[in-house]
Image: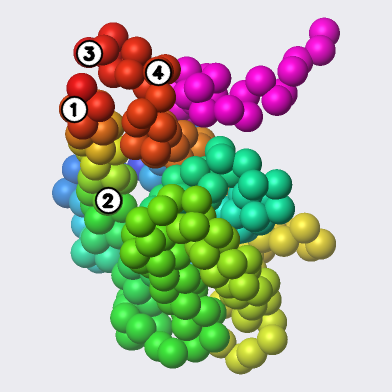
Amino acid sequence: MSWGSLDNFLAMGGYGLYVWGSYVVTLVLIVTELALLVRRKRIAIERIR
Amino acid sequence: MSINWFKYSSPQTFFPLAGKLALGFGTLALVACAVGLYLGFFVAPTDAQQGESYRIIFIHVPAAWMSMFLYVVMAFWAGMGLAFNTRLSGMMASAIAPTGALFTFIALWTGSFWGKPTWGTWWVWDARLTSELILLFLYFGFMALQAAIDDPRRADKAGAVLALVGVVNVPIIYFSVKWWNTLHQGASVSLTKAPSMAATMLTAMLIMTFGFWFYSIAAVLLRARCIMLERERGSDWVGQYARTAA
């Protein structure tokens, strides 16, 4: 699968909003979960000390 | 070689193992998702019917599978805790719920963003979508119920009953496209017949499934470690760990 240019890749054949709207939200949610886990562990350790 | 598995059934011994496993599975998840997305976006061809919009499949289907699979695993640990009253089982069930809810939401969200261009609507109350939404509410209900009960052991028991009752929803989701007339399409991949999609599409989707699976294991183990630190706050090993942790 060759896209030719970055613009074509981002356009996703006219479905850019739907494809990237799915992928970006998924990525943001996963990164948020990991950040919350790091925060939760930090707070747990602070409370023990 | 014999391994004493019971050695890892106490939080104290499981905690360091969970840390190592989380790192390993996290790394595997990153590799699998990189390979899966490369195949999905640069190798898999354009779909003849749906154009490029079908590329949502590489996260939609793995997320939907994980949402159901994680619920079953959560109910399994909840049941183990209820039956054998083991501390770690309840912690594992609690650790799975938020990640399960996350993948349920991702399945619904990406499904909505796929439904709009292909069906012309963001949402319909058909059997597949509705039962998946109920799954999200089951996860939320489990978490809310546990959060509402102060004593963790009682919270585990109450949550376990809810989790076990709710497991009936999982086969309903899975078979909904057979049992009812749904706008949602039937299964593209099943154990009994050849998959109805191009080989590269299928490969990318399966690799992404492994990626999400490995990610789930890593996230659940990290959360289980937090829960161990919170619940075993008074014990010596937690005190020692907290002093040495950076």
B178 is higher (above) or lower (below) than B223:
below
Q: How is the image coloured?
A: rainbow
Q: Residue at x 41, y 32 (%)?
A: B232
Real-space CA distance between mark 4 and mark 1, rounded to the nearest whole angstrom? 16 Å
**Which quadrant does the C terminus of chain B fall into?**
top left
Q: Amino acid at mark 2?
A: Leu
Q: Amino acid at mark 1?
A: Glu
Front in this rendered view, residue B74 or B197:
B74
Find the magenta span and give its range.
B1-28
Real-space CA distance between mark 1 and mark 3, rounded to the nearest whole angstrom? 11 Å
Residue at mark 4 shares a chain with residue at mark 3: yes
B43 relative position to B89: left or right: left
Q: Nearer the viewer, mark 2 or mark 1?
A: 1
Q: Which residue is mark 1?
A: A46
**Mark found first going from the N terminus, 2 or 1:** 2
SS of the residue under disc 3: loop
* Observer able to see residue A8: no
Residue at mark 4 shares a chain with residue at mark 1: no
Contact (Cβ within 8 Å) of mark 4 with mark 2: no
Real-space CA distance between mark 4 and mark 2, rounded to the nearest whole angstrom? 35 Å
* Mark 4: few/some/many CA within 10 Å (<14, 14-19, 20+): few
Q: Which mark is residue B246?
A: 3
Is A12 in the magenta?
no
SS of the residue under disc 1: helix
Chain of the residue under label 1? A
